[in-house]
Amino acid sequence: MTQIQFFEGTTGTAVITLPSSVDLATLTPTLHVRTKVSDVALFTLTVGSGLTILDGKIFVRVSPEQSTGKAGNYLWQLKLTDGSDVYVSEVGKWIIEKAVAR
């Protein structure tokens, strides 16, 4: 799974590419970031709020405000729903590095 890594207080971006057999036109993605898989989400991204779908890819964008003060190692997991079924991805690493003062 893709590792997502950026500095706290900056805009974090990533692209998630799924197999061509996954039809994103019929699925709703939700991305959860947690300390552990069983923990409550640190934050959740949805389409229009951090996630954009384009050309069969999911573009992830985290604002500086979302990452400020949250330096650390986390896990992310993508959930795809089609209204009744939920498909869950493998867990990936999500690293927010401490900002370096200059």
Image (cartoon, rainbow, N blue to C red):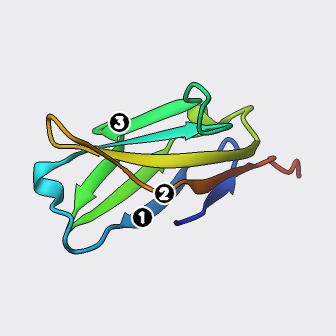
Give the residue at mark 1: 15
Which residue is the site of mark 3? 49
Amino acid of disc 2: Glu
Task: For the residues labelled 2 and 1, say whether their Cβ atoms are less than 8 Å apart.
Answer: no
- Residue labelled with disc 2: 90
Quarter of image, res 8 = top right
Q: Residue at x 29, y 73 (%)?
A: 19
Residue at position x 19%, y 71% from top?
21
In the image: residue 5, left or right of residue 89: right
Mark 2 or 1, nearer chain start? 1
**Seen from this angle, which residue lies furthest left?**
26
Residues at marks 2 and 1, CA–CA distance in whole angstroms: 15 Å
Q: Up-down: is 77 above or below 67?
A: below
SS class, disc 1:
strand
The alpha-carbon separation of the residues under discs 3 and 1 comes to: 15 Å
Q: Which of pointers 3 and 2 indicates the residue nearer the eye?
A: 2
Q: Amino acid at mark 1?
A: Val
13 vs 83: above or below: below
The three-letter code of the residue at mark 3 reads: Ser
Residue, x 18% and y 57% (percent of image)? 24
Structural crowding at the residue carrying mark 2, measured as other residues with C-alpha within 10 Å and reported as few (<14), some (14–19) or many (≥20): few
- Residue at disc 3, secondary structure: loop
Q: CA distance from mark 3 to mark 2?
A: 22 Å
Dot 2 falls on a residue whose secondary structure is loop
Judged left or right of residue 78, residue 83 is left
Eyeballing the image, is 40 above or below 93? above
The reply, left or right, for residue 64 in relation to residue 46 is: right
Write the residue at 15% across / 61% down.
23
